[in-house]
Amino acid sequence: MAKNKKNDATEKELEAIEHVLSSSEAFIEKHQNKLLIGLGVVVVIVLSYLAYSTYYVAPKEKQAAEIVAVGQKYFAQGNYEAVLHGDSVEFDGLIALTDKYSMTTSGNIGAAYVGLAYYKLGEYDNAIKYLNKTSIKDDVLAYTTLGTIGDAYVQKGETQKGIEYFLKAAKTDNAMVGATYLLKAGKAYESLAKYDKAIEVYQLIKTQYASQLPGFAPIEDIDKYIEKASSLK
């Protein structure tokens, strides 16, 4: 009796599976043309993207990288006007690059250098504008742009907003960069007479980076920063 029940259950399961398969086949037969059209559209989109990446973006990336290299050279020399506007010989400047090659990684890096150059020239609104355009995967440059936005806001007198960017910039795996921007945040808190916040940040530097950065000046002096902020409370 139990065996018959088991066989009945198995037959019902098989019937259910056959029903699902039949329904699926019927659906495919009924909508075959639509499915093929949909598949064709997907294939066209994928091929178009690959063609765009290979034959348009890749050559643009190479051109942009060569232009950025010239801009980086001028930046290293401290010639920030040339970084922005070119040298009137064969380099048009990185502002022109950011407009023409915005879809490339090098175009993004170029925008970062435009923002950094504007900051060096004391044009803080333009610095913020271009640095906010960037989306960079390189860890150090990405967090340097965030930190420089913070510096620009502090220079504009918007210190609290600057602190927000310093704290964002400190969220990096690079210990030296992280400690540097936390220290900036602590000093900025002190300038706002937010001494408890400053002490909190200094303590974080001490606990998080002391063992990683022996001999690094801000770490060596961190107890002095804590003592000073405590005395001002």
Image (tube, rainbow, N blue to C red):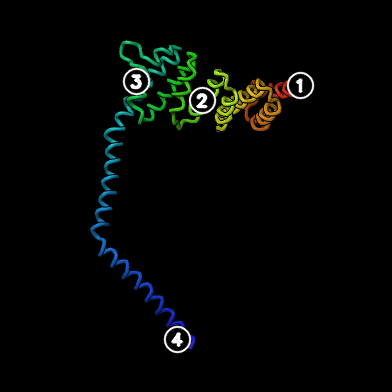
- On screen, residue 141 versus residue 68, left or right, reads right
Can you tell which quarter of the image residue 133 is in?
top left
Identified at 45% across, 86% down, the residue is 4
Give the residue at mark 2. 144
The amino acid on which the numbered mark 4 sits, given as a three-letter code, is Asn
Left or right: where does residue 110 sit relative to residue 122? left
Q: Residue at x 47, y 13 (%)?
A: 121
Tell me the tag on residue 206: none
Q: Residues within 10 Å of mark 3 (few under 14, many from 20)?
A: some
Task: Tell me, yes or no, whether the two marked residues, 2 and 4, touch with CB atoms within 8 Å.
Answer: no
Q: In this picture, is 19 found above or below 149?
A: below
Label 1: which residue? 231
Q: Which of marks 1 and 4 precedes in the sequence?
A: 4
Q: Quadrant of the C terminus?
A: top right
Percent of width and height locating residue 62: 32, 27
| CA–CA distance in space, label 4 to label 1 | 88 Å
Q: Position of residue 136 (x, y in %)?
A: 44, 30
Crowding at dot 2, Cα within 10 Å, few <14 / some 14-19 / many 20+, comes out as many
- The mark nearer the N terminus, 3 or 2, is 3
Q: CA distance from mark 2 to mark 4?
A: 75 Å
In the displayed structure, 28 sits above or below 179; it is below
Q: Secondary structure at mark 2?
A: helix
Query: On the image, numbered disc 3 is attached to which residue?
Result: 96
Single out the residue that lies furthest toward the bottom: 1
- Secondary element at image label 1: helix
Q: Nearer the viewer, mark 4 or mark 3?
A: 3
The tag on residue 4 is 4
Which quadrant of the structure image shows residue 76?
Answer: top left
Q: How many angstroms separate mark 3 from mark 2 (CA)? A: 22 Å
Helix, strand or loop at mark 4: helix
Instruction: Say which label, 2 or 4, has the lower sequence index.
Output: 4
- Please state which amino acid type lies under the numbered disc 3: Ala
